[in-house]
Image (cartoon, helix red, strand yellow):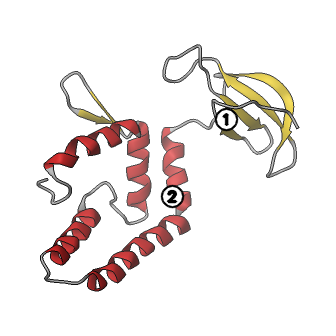
Amino acid sequence: DKCGIGTDATIAQHIATIQDRDYATKDHSQRFLPTPLGIALIEGYNSMGYQLNKPDLRRETERECNLVANRQKTKDDIVGPILNKMKDCYTVATRDARKLDEAMARHFQRVGVGNDTIVLQANFSECGNCQRAMALKQERQNPRGRANDPRKMLFCNTCQEGYIMPHRGRLCPK
C-alpha cells in the first residue's frame, strides 16, 4: 500500500502469490526469505535493465488508472503509453532471454544431470534438437521431500538437456 500498488484487500493475495510461485518463503519469525528461484529471476531481469521486483511499473499503471477514475484523463490517453511500456519490456525480455537462462544456471543444476536421478528406460524418445535418444529418468527423491512422488523427466545425454514431465497422464515410448 505504501508503494502505491494494490489495496489493503489485495495484500494477502500478493503475499500468497509470491509464496505459491516459490519466489520467497516465510521463516519462523514471519520474515520473507527469497528462494533461489526468486533470486535468479531478480538477477535475470535486472541484467536486462528491468527491476521487475520493484513496484515502479505497477505503481505507474495504477496511478494512470486512478487519473481516469477521477476524470483527469481518458482511457484513450493512458492505454497506448501503458501498452507500449509493456511491449518494450516484453521485447527486451524476449531478446535477452539468455540473461535469464544464465541467472537460472547460477542457482540451479540442470535437470537430469548428476547422481540424483535413475534411468527408468533408455532410448525412450527422440530428442527434438539432435534427434538422438532420450532416456526417461526419475529423481531418487522429490525435491520437496515427497519420496513417494518423485518427478520424471526426459533427458538427452548429447544435448545435456532435461525436461520435467507432467505428473498426470501416461508416458508412452516412441
Q: Residues within 10 Å of mark 1 (few under 14, many from 20)?
A: some
Question: Hey, what amino acid is under mark 1?
Answer: Met
Q: Residue at x 31, y 38 (%)?
A: 16
The residue depicted at 18 percent of the width and 24 percent of the height is 29
Image point (56%, 21%), residue name: 142
Q: Which of 79/49 is in front?
A: 79
Query: Which amino acid is tagged 2?
Result: Lys
Q: Secondary structure at mark 2?
A: helix
Q: Is residue 107 above or below residue 64?
A: above
Percent position of residue 169, x then y:
70, 32
The percent coordinates of residue 108 (x first, y second) are 52, 37
Q: Check disc 1 and report the residue beneath it.
A: 165
Q: In the image, 170: left or right of 55?
A: right
Horizontally, is 19 left or right of 102 in the view?
Answer: left
**Residue 99 - label:** 2
Q: Measured along the vertical axis of the image, is residue 82 above or below residue 105?
A: below
At 38% across and 37% down in the image, what residue appears? Answer: 20
Mark closer to the observer (1, 2): 1
Horizontal side of residue 31 vs 133, given as left or right: left
